[in-house]
Amino acid sequence: MRFPAKTVWPEGVNAGDAVPEFPEKEEIIYMLGQDPLIKVRKITRIFLAWHAHGIRCVRPLLQKWLNLPADVDLEPGVNFKSGQVYCEKNVNLGNTLFVDYAPIYIAEYVGFAFNNTIVTSSHDPENFKRAIIRPVVIERNVSITTNVTILGGVRIGENSIIGAGSVVTKSIPPNVFAAGNPCVPIKEINRDLRR
């Protein structure tokens, strides 16, 4: 998966760069109160407007402000906590909750159904004021069905399907149907839907 040209990426990332492989143990640690994310208040105001005024007037503003491609589909209820979701073209985000304190990279032709959550942060059980954040990568042509929770540090391989109600705690290989709590590959599939 490579960063596309027509998207604004984080500082130090250029179009054409490969999305990095994240080691299973890579994590960024913040102490609560030291979080440098400034966009949160503005995004919250946009979502209040979204729910008050409807999707038509707020969608273009949200897509522009989050630097999302024009063909990324947003539905009422989609929620970004800090604006660190980076999408390629032809992505349907559904009404997913993105707790995106670390980056979430989503390749082209990914689809989310309903009531999904991606959480990039957790707390240190020995020091609850310490937040541990890890990025998430969802590769090309992945389908996330309904009521799926994806935790930080996960990479979902291309062409895979994640079954309803799954909790994804570890990376999922390409070309599999995976489901369960915790989510595990159940069978290999042949699903390369090039469009």
Image (cartoon, grey):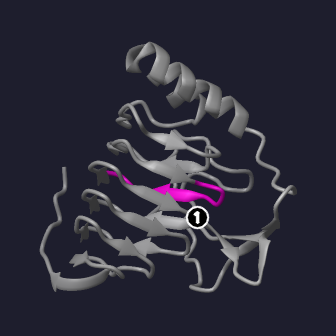
**Residue 146 among magenta residues:** no
**Residue 104 among magenta residues:** yes
Residue 98, compared with residue 185, is above or below; it is: above
Residue 114 left/right relative to 45:
left
Residue 40, compared with residue 54, is above or below; it is: below
Q: Quadrant of residue 46?
A: top right
Classified by dominant secondary structure, the portion drawn in magenta counts as loop
* Residue at figure coordinates x 60%, y 58% from the top left: 103
Residue 157, visible in the rendered structure: no
Using the image as rendered, state which of residue 85 and residue 108 is in the foreground: 85
At numbered mark 1, what does the secondary structure look like: helix, strand or loop? loop
Q: What kind of residue is marked 1?
A: Thr
**Residue 181's x, y, as percent?**
33, 79
Give the residue pinned by disc 1. 120
**Residue 142's x, y, as percent?**
29, 62
Using the image as rendered, state which of residue 96 and residue 123 is in the foreground: 123
**Residue 88's x, y, as percent?**
43, 48
* Residue at figure coordinates x 48%, y 17% from the top left: 52
Q: Residues within 10 Å of mark 1 (few under 14, many from 20)?
A: many
Which range is magenta?
Answer: 100-109
Using the image as rendered, state which of residue 42 and residue 86 is in the foreground: 42
